[in-house]
Amino acid sequence: MASPLLIDCDPGVDDMIALLFACASHEIRLLGVTTVSGNVGVDKTTANALAILALAGRSDVPVARGSSRPLIRSVRGGAADVHGDNGLGGVCLPPSDVAPDPRHAVDFLAETVTDSAEPVTLIATGPLTNIALFYARYPDVASSLRRVIIMGGSIGPGNVTPAAEFNCWFDPEAAYRVLTDTGLSRQVPNFMIGLDVAARVSLGVNELSVLRNSGRVGAYVADALGGQYLNHFRDLDGRDTMPIYDSVTVVEAVCPGLITMAPASVEVDTSTERGRGATEVHFRSSNDQIVEQSVGVDANGEKIVEVILERLAGGDLPSCA
Ligand code: RIB
Ligand code: CA
């Protein structure tokens, strides 16, 4: 029986791959997508989410627009230098002819979780603003989640500052509420997959070529990856490989075991100092685990890439009109 899933995201090139992989995975039932400002503004992340679902032939999946700014302090800019001004590497997907759901993302999350006959898994691949507001406004509903899987934070250094990973840097107070002090009556099992582990899932030019020759969806994905996104990472480390960070969250939901998790607690730095947005991970022995929280410590990157390519390129997606 496919398990119910919600995805909160800021598409975003790697968010796009996560969404398409979810659409191509029969193990899950995608109940809806919510959007947040992060890589680019929420108007663009919302339009991108709608267009990505239309590309996958899944315009039946509702998209609800969320927060346009962090909880407390706005930051200058997002990640257009990585994902392009439009958030998808400059690729213009055919626009969706479906309007966003009229509800705010937080209300949409609450009503969808409430209406689900089975406990829902919530995935977050952008800044955690919507999730923090969901926890604050609907704590009892949030406490009924099956689990939360987050791409964010880092055991080691950051990517947007030496200390902080982008999603936690963009809204540290929200990350603190979701990763450090949820305030929920029941601690929802929480799986944080940080930068260091997510970066082990990377595509190279060979995978680009497979995608490009695999059909309409794969060609769009290859175009989104192969321009500014590839150049950013090539300039960063001189290699022709691109991490597809966000996809690890859906992999964890669909193919448990490909990501190795360890019990840990996470402290998010909400100071205004240089460490702002940093995630301090304290590994725990499983018997003294107060908070049911785990952090990714390893990923079988090769197998994950194989599964993603197989599903994106293998025609699992409904044929696109
Ligand atoms: O640090 C990587 C994260 O920031 C990913 O979610 C990427 O999409 C950006 O949002
Ligand atoms: Ca993202």
Image (cartoon, rainbow, N blue to C red):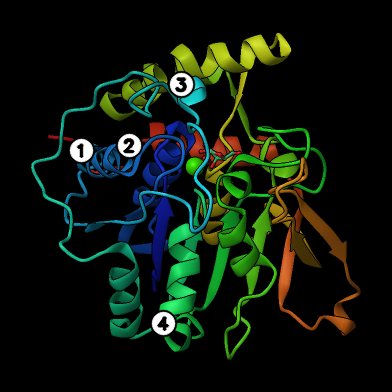
Front label number (4 vs 3): 4
**Residue 246 percent location from the top left of the image:** 54, 43
Mark 3 nearby-residue class (10 Å; few <14, some 14–19, many ≥20): many
The one nearer the camera, 313 or 40, is 40
Front label number (2 vs 4): 4
**Residue 23 percent location from the top left of the image:** 34, 50
User: Quarter holding the C terminus?
Assistant: top left
Front label number (3 vs 1): 3
Contact between labelled residues 1 and 2, with CB atoms less than 8 Å apart: yes
Query: Hey, which quadrant is residue 40 in on the image?
Result: top left
User: What residue is shown with label 4?
Assistant: 138
Mark carried by residue 225: 3
In the displayed structure, would residue 263 be above or below residue 52? below
**Residue 263 percent location from the top left of the image:** 80, 69
State the separation of the CA atoms marked 4 and 3. Answer: 37 Å
In the displayed structure, would residue 61 be above or below residue 162? below
Image-quarter location of ligand 1: top right
The answer to whether residue 300 shows anywhere in this view is no
* Left or right of 277 on screen, residue 6: left
Tell me which residue sits at (50%, 30%) in the image: 79
Tell me which residue sits at (33%, 44%) in the image: 42
Is the CB atom of the residue marked by disc 4 within 8 angstroms of ligand 2's nearest atom?
no
Of pointers 3 and 1, the one earlier in the residue sequence: 3
In the displayed structure, would residue 235 be above or below residue 177? above
- Secondary structure, mark 1, is loop
Of pointers 1 and 4, the one earlier in the residue sequence: 4
State the separation of the CA atoms marked 1 and 4. Answer: 38 Å
- Secondary structure, mark 2, is loop
Amino acid type for the residue under numbered disc 1: Ser
**Residue 319 percent location from the top left of the image:** 20, 38
User: What residue is shown with label 2?
Assistant: 315
Amino acid type for the residue under numbered disc 3: Leu
